[in-house]
Image (cartoon, rainbow, N blue to C red):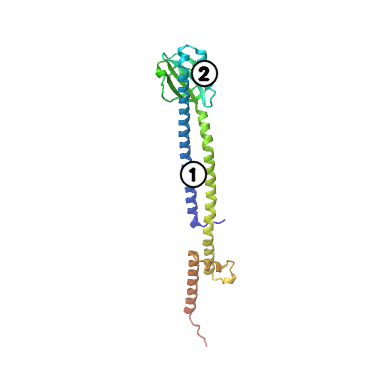
Amino acid sequence: MKITRLFQRTMFGIFFLFLLIGVSTSVVSIYSVDLHLTSEYEENSRDIAKTIADASVDIILNRDLSSLQSLIDQFVEIQGISYIYIVNDTDEYLAHTFVPGIPEEILESERQVGETVTRNLAGMGDFVEVSSYILAGHVGSVHIGMDVSHVALAIQQAIGNQIYLIAIIFFVGIFASIWFVSFAAKPINSLLDYAVILAKGERQEDSKIPNEQILTRNDEVGHLARLFQYFSTVTDTEKLEKEPEVKETK
């Protein structure tokens, strides 16, 4: 399939346009899904932290630490939650889900209850930590850590179908644009071939191109073909008129 130079820039323009649309749509989709799912995970973790805080008031006041440990062990099985620990109002650790012990990064860090904290724990990975006060902070606080890799995996799964759809639309659009441009370029190629025939002075019956199809077209290609034919006819007539008469020599 031959594409004339006239349409090559058009093809590159279409390719660039589809690429720009695909990239921009993908970036917006990834950003929107990332923001939405991250906020959703953080909000769900805060709700879980508040649930644990409300359920652990009596347990902490009664100093029933085994029941407190059993309570947080149930919630750590929820997908996305990696660890939970509870501290009292004096920053004493009452229960936690770390094995074998609490990482030094957490032991040395300051408590920022109510805020989202990003942590990097050696040998464990990256986490986002949310927290909630127990009895308005008079009893202590609950802290929940979410594994960033689980959040990233959920985001990839959510945007995967969108990216596939965008890629399919991109490739279908590219092939469709090639077909449409070639469809528009075909009569231009025929017009060029017809112009070459007229320039060479070939007879219509000797040419391999169906000139009637070009001359009978009701578009710009047909108008140009008829114009070429007219100028070719006028030129031939002028040549005959300007030929000098040959005088007979005695």
For the residue pair 55 and 233, the one nearer the viewer reads as 55
**Residue 175 location, x and y as percent?**
55, 51
Q: Which residue appears at 48% of the width and 32% of the height?
A: 37
Near-viewer residue (67 or 100): 67
Q: Secondary structure at mark 2?
A: helix
**Of the numbered discs in the image, which one, if any, rests on residue 96?**
none
Which residue is disc 1 drawn over? Answer: 22
Which mark's residue is nearer the viewer, 2 or 1?
Answer: 2
Q: Secondary structure beneath disc 1?
A: helix
Instruction: Report the label total.
Output: 2
Q: Is residue 172 left or right of residue 137?
A: right
Amino acid beneath label 1:
Gly
Residue 71's disc number: 2
Residue extending farthest bottom: 250
Name the residue: 54% across, 45% down.
168
Q: Are marks 2 and 1 in contact (CB under 8 Å)?
A: no
Q: Is residue 71 visible?
A: yes
